[in-house]
Amino acid sequence: MNLMQSHKKDFLNCVSIIQKRLPRKLRDHPISFIDFMRKSLNEASNIKEFKKKLAGPNVRTRNAHDFYGWMSKDGAWGACRGAFYRSENYMKIELEKRSGKKSDIDEDFGVHIEHTIPVDVILESIWHRRKTFKSISNDQILQKKLYEKFLSISVCTAFTRNEEKTCIPKVYDRKHPDFEDGRLLNMDSLNEVLPFKRYNFENGLRLFEVINGTEISPDSWSLKDHTELMSKVNIYDWNYVSKFSYS
């Protein structure tokens, strides 16, 4: 089994774990999170308050990503096992040795989930579309639209700890070059955003998606490609996710 095959299997094993979690009543369940986001959009009077609700002490947005295995912390679906975007160096680490522990931050097998579009940018982007969301009177349709928009800009990549330090220019630590305060720059649609343009590839960084095995070209891979890729896996499909009740 080659490197790509083993990492696709690793990803699909994580998908199976998540499928088993979906019917359970969980605080980080996508339905629960999206309902919380819907309420927060209605209750918050400004963007600062909205971000505090979604990324405050309870870190709800990161928990929502954790649900899908987009996390470095250890666990059955941890160590970035749910990431379908992975760096070549991450994939070269022996699967059983991967560790997201802080104590292993300087080790060659230390791993990190990188929010390719930072959480702040995701929340700012949602907030600036609040009028559109608030105009939807049907709660079920609103939840679906919120969920799909949230996932469409939730791009998370499995990195090594060393790549975390060297591949992100300081100017983009919590920003993205296609956004300014959550608003799009020089483009008409989120589909046109190039999420991986935020990284520095000059030192040999190579990224792959493990669903089809395609190498990512940062100058052409867009959020449209991201959304189309996710559509191939049922755990990201609202029509599948919403069948489960957490109440």
Image (cartoon, helix red, strand yellow):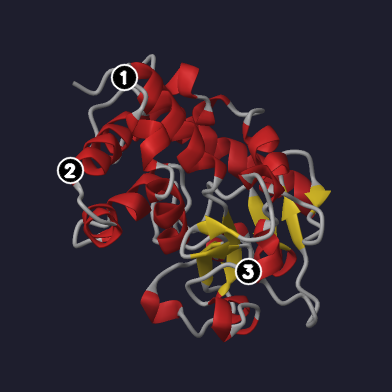
Q: Is residue 170 left or right of residue 102?
A: right
Quarter of the image for residue 57 reads bottom left
Which residue: 79% across, 45% down? 213
Q: Earlier in the sequence, mark 1 or mark 2?
A: 2
Which residue is nearer to you in this view: 88 or 201?
A: 201
Q: Position of residue 177 (x, y in %)?
A: 63, 69
Q: Earlier in the sequence, mark 3 or mark 2?
A: 2
How far apart marks 3 and 2 lie (CA) works out to: 30 Å
Q: Earlier in the sequence, mark 1 or mark 3?
A: 1
Q: Can residue 165 be seen in the rendering of this structure? A: no
Quarter of the image for residue 242 reads top left
How far apart marks 1 and 3 lie (CA) works out to: 34 Å
How many other residues sit within 10 Å of disc 1, few (<14), some (14-19) or many (≥20)? few
Q: Can residue 141 be seen in the rendering of this structure? A: yes
Q: Position of residue 219 (x, y in %)?
A: 81, 61
How far apart marks 1 and 2 lie (CA) works out to: 16 Å
Q: Position of residue 222 (x, y in %)?
A: 72, 49
How many other residues sit within 10 Å of disc 2, few (<14), some (14-19) or many (≥20)? few
For the C terminus, the image quarter is top left
Q: Looking at the picture, which amino acid does disc 2 mark?
A: Glu
Mark sitting on residue 43:
2
Q: Which residue is mark 1?
A: 137
Residue 49's place in the image compared with 1, above or below, is: below
Q: Which residue is mark 3?
A: 177
Q: Position of residue 241 (x, y in %)?
A: 43, 23
Which residue is nearer to you in this view: 105 or 243?
A: 243
Which residue: 69% across, 36% down? 229
* Circles 3 and 2: CB atoms closer than 8 Å: no
Which residue: 36% across, 54% down? 62
